[in-house]
Image (spheres, rainbow, N blue to C red):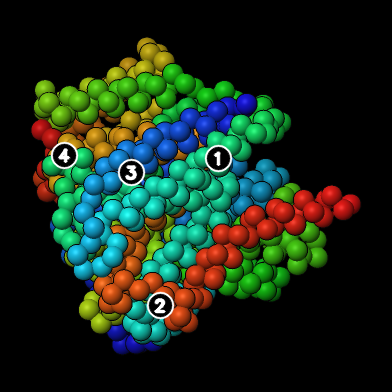
C-alpha cells in the first residue's frame, strides 16, 4: 500500500470543497437510501450529468460517497417500515423490523449502523491492501484473458441473479446486444445503425442507465402508490453498541464483513447477494438460529456488515481490472470514461491520484456515514413518509434533465423513456436489470479484446484453451452455466429415489 | 397462466422481436479485413443465444402453470391508474419539450402541477401544495441547472 499517496489523497479530500462534496454525497446517499423506491444506482445515474464540468477527483469523491451512503441508508426503511430502502437491505427487514416493532427501534438501527461501519472498514482494509498487487497481476492479462474473464463474469452475474439462469442470460446478453449499434470497435465503421444518423454514435450509457434504473422504478412505485406503510415510533435509545455487544457480535461482524468483501470482489454481484450469504452463514453458525426472523441481533449485524462490505470489495475489480463489481460500479466506470479516464490495470500508473482518491473517499465516507446516521437517524427517518405523489414526478423531471444534459439532444431523452418502459416490462417478467447494465458496459470491451486477440493470432481461437488463465475462466464459466441444470437434475433424482 | 407467466411470455416475445431486428440488420455487414470475425458474427451470436434463452422462458411458462403464492395472492392491487398517469404525462411532457412549445420552467411547472394533483386523485385540498411545489421545483431547477451547474436545458 502506498501510504503516502493514500494520505495525500485523504488530505486533498479534507480540503473545503472536496469535503463539502463528500458530505453532500454521503448525506444524499443516506437520504435516498431512506426513501423507499429510490436507490443508490438511481441517485448516482442522476448525479452523473452534474459531474461533467467537475474536476474528475471531486466527481469521483462525490459518487463514491453517494455509493457508501445509499447502501447504508437502506437500513432505516428496512427497520422501520419492513420495506428495504435499497435492495441490499432486504435481509435486514427480517430482524430489524420485528425488533423495532417490539419497542427497540433505536437498538435495531444502532446495531445496523455500527455493523455497516465495521463492514465498510474491513472491506476498506482489503481494498487498500490488495488492489494494487491485483492490478499489477492484471497488467499481464492479454486480450484472451480479458475476454474470458468478462464472459465468466457475465455467466456469474446471470447465474446468481434473481429468477432463472435463462432470465439472467437474457438480461446480460440483451444489454450486450443493445450496446453494439454505433462504431465498430475494430474497423471504425458504423454498424447496426438502421441507416439512422442518430445511432452513429451508439446508445449512450447515461440515458440507458437512467431509463432502466430510474424511470422503470418511478413507474413501478407509481403502481404501489396506494400502499400506506405502518408507522413505528422512533427513539434513539440503545443506539450505540457497547463493549459487551462488540464481544458478543465480534466473530459475526468479522465473518459477515469478510463474506461481503469477497462477494463484492466477484464481478457483477451486488450487495444483496452478500447480505443473503452472510445472513445464512450467521444463522447456520448461531447458537440460537430459531431467533432469526423474529428480531435477532445477529441477523441485523450479519446483513448490514455484509452489504456495506460489498462496497469496498466491489471497488477492487473496478480499480484493478476495469470490471464492475456491482451495478453501481458499472455506473462508476461510465463516470470515469466520461472524464476520459480508462478504467483498468494501468489506472494506478496513469491516474494514481484518482485511484487513491477513490480509496480514501471510501474510508472517509464510511466514517461520515456512521457519524451522520448515529446523530440524525431520528430526523432522516421522517423522510420515509414523504408522499410519493410529490416525489415521483419531481424525480422524473431530474431524469429528463439528466438525460438531456449529456449531449443537449432530445434523442437521449427518448432513449431514456424507451429503456424505462423496457426496464419496467423486464421487471414485471422478473428479468433482473443488473446484468443488463453490466452487459451494456462490458460488451464493447469484450468484443474489442476478442477481436484484437484474433488479429494477433491470425484468427486462431486456440489460446482460449491452451493458455492457463483463459482456460481456467472458461472452465469456471462452463461450470457456472451447467451448475443450475446439474443441481436441478440431482435434486429431482434424489426426490425420485425417496 | 398467472400474471407473471403472461408477462414472461409477452416480454420474451418482445425480446425475440428485438433480436430478430438486430439479426436482420447485421446480416449484410462486411467480413473482417484483419481478423476472421468482422462486424456481424458477434451481434448475430449474441442475438441467437438471447432468442434461445427467451424461447426457454416461454417454453417453461407455457409448460407448467404455477399458482401464485398466498403472499402474492393477498398482495394489494397495484394502482394502474397512477402508473398510467405518470407514464402518459411524461410522454406528453417530453413531446412538448421536444417541440419547445414553452420555456422549460413553465413546462415543468405545468407537468408537476398536473401530475401531482392527479396522483392525489384531484383532491381540492392538495391543489395549493401541488401548485407551490410545482412552481418552486420548475423555476428553481431551471435556475440551478443553467446558472449553478451550467447544464443546458431544452428551453
Front disc: 4 or 2? 2
Quarter holding the N terminus of chain A?
A: bottom left
Q: How far apart are marks 1 and 2 (CA)?
A: 34 Å
Q: For mark 3, name the chain.
A: B
Could you tell me which residue is drawn at 38 percent across and 61 percent down? A329
Q: For mark 4, name the chain.
A: A
Q: How far apart are marks 4 and 2 (CA)?
A: 38 Å
* Residue occupied by mark 2: A463
Front disc: 1 or 2? 2
Tag 4's secondary structure?
loop
Q: Are marks 4 and 1 in contact (CB under 8 Å)?
A: no
Could you tell me which residue is drawn at 55 percent across and 42 percent down? B56
Q: Distance between the residues labelled 4 and 1?
A: 32 Å
Q: Distance between the residues labelled 3 and 1?
A: 20 Å
* Residue occupied by mark 1: B57
Residue A240 at what x, y percent from top left? 58, 63
Left or right side of A103 for A446: left
In the displayed structure, would residue A162 be above or below residue B91? below
* Residue occupied by mark 3: B23
Choose between B10 and A49: the one closer to the eye.
B10
Q: How crowded is mark 1: few (under 14 residues within 10 Å), some or many (20 or more)?
A: many
Q: Do the residues labelled 1 and 2 touch (CB within 8 Å)?
A: no
Mark nearer the N terminus (3 vs 1)? 3
Could you tell me which residue is drawn at 28 percent across and 53 percent down? B40
Tag 2's secondary structure?
helix
Mark nearer the N terminus (4 vs 2)? 4
Residue A398 at what x, y percent from top left? 27, 39
Left or right side of A385 for A345: left
Q: Do the residues labelled 3 and 1 touch (CB within 8 Å)?
A: no
Q: How far apart are marks 3 and 4 (CA)?
A: 17 Å
* Residue occupied by mark 4: A196
Front disc: 3 or 1? 3
Amino acid at each position: 500500500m502506498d501510504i503516502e499517496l493514500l494520505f495525500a489523497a485523504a488530505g486533498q479530500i479534507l480540503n473545503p470543497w472536496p469535503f463539502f462534496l463528500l458530505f453532500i454525497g454521503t448525506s444524499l446517499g443516506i437520504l435516498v437510501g431512506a426513501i423507499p423506491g429510490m436507490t443508490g444506482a438511481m441517485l448516482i445515474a442522476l448525479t452523473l450529468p452534474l459531474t461533467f464540468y467537475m474536476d474528475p477527483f471531486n466527481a469521483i469523491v462525490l459518487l463514491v460517497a453517494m455509493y457508501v451512503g445509499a447502501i447504508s441508508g437502506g437500513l432505516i426503511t428496512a427497520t422501520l417500515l419492513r420495506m428495504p430502502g435499497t435492495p441490499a437491505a432486504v435481509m435486514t427487514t427480517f430482524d430489524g423490523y420485528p425488533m423495532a416493532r417490539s419497542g427497540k427501534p433505536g437498538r435495531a438501527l444502532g446495531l445496523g449502523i455500527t455493523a455497516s461501519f465495521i463492514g465498510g472498514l474491513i472491506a476498506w482494509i482489503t481494498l487498500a491492501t490488495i488492489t494494487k498487487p491485483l492490478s499489477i497481476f492484471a497488467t499481464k492479462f492479454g486480450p484472451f484473458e480479458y475476454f474470458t474473464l468478462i464472459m465468466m463474469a457475465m455467466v456469474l452475474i446471470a447465474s446468481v441473479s434473481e429468477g432463472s439462469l435463462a432470465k439472467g442470460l437474457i438480461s446480460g446478453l440483451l444489454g450486450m446486444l443493445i450496446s453494439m449499434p454505433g462504431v465498430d470497435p475494430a474497423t471504425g465503421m458504423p454498424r447496426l445503425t438502421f441507416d439512422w444518423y442518430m445511432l452513429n454514435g451508439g446508445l449512450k450509457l447515461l440515458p440507458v442507465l437512467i431509463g432502466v434504473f430510474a424511470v422503470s422504478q418511478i413507474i413501478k412505485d407509481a403502481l404501489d402508490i396506494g400502499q400506506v406503510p405502518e408507522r413505528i415510533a422512533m427513539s434513539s435509545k440503545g443506539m450505540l453498541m457497547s463493549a459487551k455487544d462488540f464481544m458478543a457480535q465480534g466473530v459475526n461482524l468479522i465473518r459477515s464483513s469478510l463474506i461481503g468483501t469477497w462477494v463484492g470482489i466477484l464481478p457483477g454481484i451486488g450487495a444483496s447477494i452478500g447480505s443473503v450469504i452472510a445472513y445464512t452463514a450467521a444463522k447456520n453458525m448461531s447458537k440460537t438460529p430459531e431467533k432469526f426472523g423474529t428480531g435477532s441481533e445477529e441477523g441485523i449485524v450479519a446483513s448490514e456488515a455484509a452489504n456495506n462490505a460489498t462496497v469496498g470489495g466491489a471497488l477492487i475489480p473496478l480499480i484493478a481490472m476495469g470490471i464492475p463489481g456491482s451495478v453501481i460500479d458499472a455506473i462508476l466506470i461510465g463516470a470515469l470514461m466520461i472524464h476520459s479516464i480508462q478504467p483498468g490495470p494501468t489506472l494506478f500508473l496513469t491516474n494514481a491520484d484518482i485511484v487513491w482518491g477513490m480509496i480514501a473517499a471510501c474510508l472517509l465516507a464510511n466514517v461520515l456515514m456512521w457519524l451522520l446516521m448515529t446523530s440524525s437517524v431520528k430526523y432522516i427517518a421522517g423522510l420515509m413518509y414523504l408522499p410519493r405523489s410529490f416525489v415521483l414526478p419531481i424525480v422524473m423531471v431530474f431524469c429528463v434533465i439528466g438525460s438531456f444534459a449529456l449531449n443537449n439532444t432530445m434523442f437521449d431523452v427518448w432513449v431514456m423513456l424507451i429503456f424505462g418502459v423496457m426496464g419496467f416490462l423486464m421487471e414485471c417478467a422478473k428479468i433482473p436489470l443488473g446484468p443488463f447494465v453490466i452487459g451494456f458496459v462490458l460488451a464493447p470491451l469484450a468484443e474489442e479484446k476478442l477481436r484484437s486477440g484474433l488479429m494477433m493470432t491470425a484468427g486462431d481461437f486456440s489460446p482460449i484453451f491452451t493458455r492457463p488463465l483463459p482456460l481456467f475462466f472458461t472452465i469456471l464459466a462452463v461450470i457456472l452455466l451447467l451448475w443450475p441444470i446439474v443441481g436441478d437434475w440431482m435434486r429431482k433424482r434424489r426426490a425420485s429415489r425417496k | 397462466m398467472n400474471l407473471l407467466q403472461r408477462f414472461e411470455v409477452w416480454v420474451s416475445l418482445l425480446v425475440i422481436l428485438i433480436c430478430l431486428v438486430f439479426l436482420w440488420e447485421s446480416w449484410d455487414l462486411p467480413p473482417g479485413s484483419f481478423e476472421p470475425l468482422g462486424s456481424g458474427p458477434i451481434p448475430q451470436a449474441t442475438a441467437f443465444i438471447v432468442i434461445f434463452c427467451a424461447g426457454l422462458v416461454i417454453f417453461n411458462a407455457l409448460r407448467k402453470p404455477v399458482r401464485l403464492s398466498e403472499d402474492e395472492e393477498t398482495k394489494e392491487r397495484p394502482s394502474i391508474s397512477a402508473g398510467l398517469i405518470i407514464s402518459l404525462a411524461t410522454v406528453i411532457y417530453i413531446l412538448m419539450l421536444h417541440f419547445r412549445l414553452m420555456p422549460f420552467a413553465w413546462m415543468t411547472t405545468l407537468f408537476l402541477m398536473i401530475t401531482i394533483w392527479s396522483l392525489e386523485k384531484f383532491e381540492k385540498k392538495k391543489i395549493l401544495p401541488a401548485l407551490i411545489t410545482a412552481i418552486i421545483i420548475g423555476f428553481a431547477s431551471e435556475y440551478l441547472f443553467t446558472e449553478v451547474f451550467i447544464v443546458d436545458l431544452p428551453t
